[in-house]
């Protein structure tokens, strides 16, 4: 694995969908770099500090959210002289997103007064009154032809289906929720899943014409759904709940296909590989101990805050670190707060927020845990390689942690004082974007071999 040097950032940064560019916010400037040479391709100056960045799907336009000024600016990579500014006036702008055709921008005003569709081709705009949420509650089909927008009026939640070609409302239907949390299309665009707020356990699946296909409630009298995710193949729907259990539904009968419990003690009959992060013991040669320049040079890793770590395979049964959430505070840190499917839908990784240092990797075919990674620090992010079965995670330390079906291993970041707090893959799986608080770097990865034995430090 090869690392680039660190580059400055003060806000969001992300790869373009075609994996050719990296957009980075540096105060009020938008810096676009080539993803291979890292040379600056374009430099745009915004009117205020950039809070949000989003690429259009065709990688030609970039959206910048200037939320302190309640406005949006958009830029063209192929036409640097072209500019676009969207300002809703007193209504303000709470969130903005691209449409699938890359030629319309959807903005949500403050207090969810209205959602507006702005055209970059002409001055036309379309309004949808009373959107349910600012950043959530909007989903597009995979083919980009339709949008589902959640609205609320008269204390009732509704789904509005709009054509992404004409932006006309194709249909509206009410949904059986008390306080709709979010919405997501299935990968084959045949169904829409919505779920209620944590106060009411309810998962509903509707057809695009408004027919209710499923009402699912795993239990009553407790905090409900915390996270939901479709598998890339569209055959499974994963539902993460506050009761620390992951439930997987199949798309044919909408019945529960598997239930995965996140217990603080792991014991048989399942015997997953448990990898625990430990410090690499220091190797000191006491026979020729002296404090000279060579000694200091050889221990530069320690002075830069780099401590070598490795994974140690633990025996079962084992007790995992567990934090009991306080009962007198809202939004308890428990339940499945992080989940992510592998690209082949064979594995799903989860984090129970009551065990923030532990990442579970479940084998869907075998319906059992394939591996458990126990870190020293809470897991910040975990994401799968988009092209193969390789999982990468970070914990805010200077190391990267990887898992494949062959094993797990640790990679040390050579940059001094660079702690990885977030990471993102590019679309072809050849490069990782690693973020620190005020800088970023990239890591180039080799193509994953078909069979390899990773077990500790790399």
Image (spheres, rainbow, N blue to C red):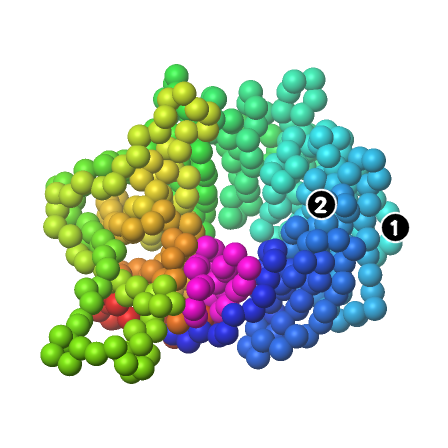
At numbered mark 2, what does the secondary structure look like: helix, strand or loop? loop
Residue tagged 1: 123
Residue tagged 2: 67
Q: Could you tell me how far apart the alpha carbons at marks 1 and 2 are, in whole angstroms?
A: 22 Å
Left or right side of 342 for 156? right
Left or right side of 69 for 23? left
Q: From the image, which quarter does the C terminus lie in?
A: bottom left
Is residue 362 shown above or below 33? Answer: above
Q: Residue at x 36, y 63 (%)?
A: 305
Density class for disc 2 (Cα within 10 Å; few <14, some 14-19, many ≥20) is: some
Image location (x, y in percent) of residue 356: 34, 42
User: For residue 423: magenta?
Assistant: yes
On the question of residue 438 being in view, the answer is yes
Is residue 446 shown above or below 122? Answer: below
Q: Residue at x 46, y 29 (%)?
A: 331
Image location (x, y in percent) of residue 379: 37, 49
Is residue 174 shown above or below 163? Answer: above
Left or right side of 186 for 29? right
Pick the front one: 198 or 300:
300
Is residue 27 shown above or below 181? Answer: below
Q: Residue at x 35, y 29 (%)?
A: 325
The stretch in magenta equals 415-442
Pick the front one: 73 or 221:
73
- Count the numbered circles shown: 2
Q: Residue at x 39, y 71 (%)?
A: 414
Of the image marks 1 and 2, the number of the one nearer the N terminus: 2
């Amino acid at each position: 694995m090869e690392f680039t040097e660190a580059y400055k950032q003060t806000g969001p940064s992300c790869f373009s969908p075609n994996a050719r560019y990296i957009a980075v916010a540096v105060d009020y400037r938008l810096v676009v770099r080539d993803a291979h040479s890292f040379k600056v391709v374009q430099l745009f100056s915004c009117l205020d500090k950039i809070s949000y960045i989003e690429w259009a799907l065709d990688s030609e336009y970039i959206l910048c959210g200037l939320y302190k000024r309640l406005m949006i600016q958009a830029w063209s990579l192929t036409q640097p002289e072209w500019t676009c500014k969207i300002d809703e006036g007193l209504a303000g702008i709470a969130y903005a997103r691209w449409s699938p055709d890359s030629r319309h921008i959807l903005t949500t005003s403050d207090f969810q007064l209205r959602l507006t569709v702005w055209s970059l081709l002409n001055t036309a705009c379309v309004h949808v009154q009373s959107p349910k949420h600012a950043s959530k509650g909007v989903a597009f089909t995979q083919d980009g032809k339709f949008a589902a927008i959640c609205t609320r009026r008269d204390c009732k939640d509704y789904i509005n289906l709009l054509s992404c070609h004409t932006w006309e409302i194709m249909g509206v239907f009410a949904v059986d929720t008390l306080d709709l949390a979010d919405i997501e299309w299935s990968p084959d665009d045949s169904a829409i899943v919505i779920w209620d707020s944590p106060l009411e356990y309810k998962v509903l699946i509707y057809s695009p014409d408004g027919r209710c296909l499923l009402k699912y409630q795993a239990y009553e009298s407790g905090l409900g759904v915390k996270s939901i995710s479709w598998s890339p193949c569209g055959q499974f729907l994963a539902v993460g709940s506050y009761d620390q259990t992951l439930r997987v539904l199949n798309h044919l009968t909408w019945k529960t296909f598997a239930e995965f419990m996140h217990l603080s003690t792991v014991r048989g009959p399942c015997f997953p590989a448990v990898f625990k992060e430990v410090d690499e013991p220091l190797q000191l040669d006491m026979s020729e101990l002296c404090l000279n320049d060579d000694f200091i040079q050889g221990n530069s890793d320690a002075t830069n805050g780099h401590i070598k770590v490795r994974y140690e395979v633990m025996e079962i049964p084992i007790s995992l670190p567990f934090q009991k959430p306080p009962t007198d505070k809202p939004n308890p840190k428990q339940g499945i707060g992080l989940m992510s499917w592998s690209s082949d839908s064979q594995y799903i990784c989860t984090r129970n927020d009551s065990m923030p240092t532990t990442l579970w990797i479940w084998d869907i075919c075998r319906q059992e845990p394939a591996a458990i990674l126990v870190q020293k620090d809470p897991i910040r992010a975990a994401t799968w390689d988009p092209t193969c079965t390789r999982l990468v995670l970070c914990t805010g330390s200077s190391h990267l942690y990887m898992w494949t079906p062959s094993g797990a291993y640790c990679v040390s970041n050579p940059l001094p004082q660079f702690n990885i707090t977030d990471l993102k893959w590019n679309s072809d799986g050849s490069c990782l974007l690693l973020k620190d608080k005020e800088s970023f770097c990239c890591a180039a990865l080799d193509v994953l071999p078909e069979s390899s034995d990773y077990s500790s430090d790399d």
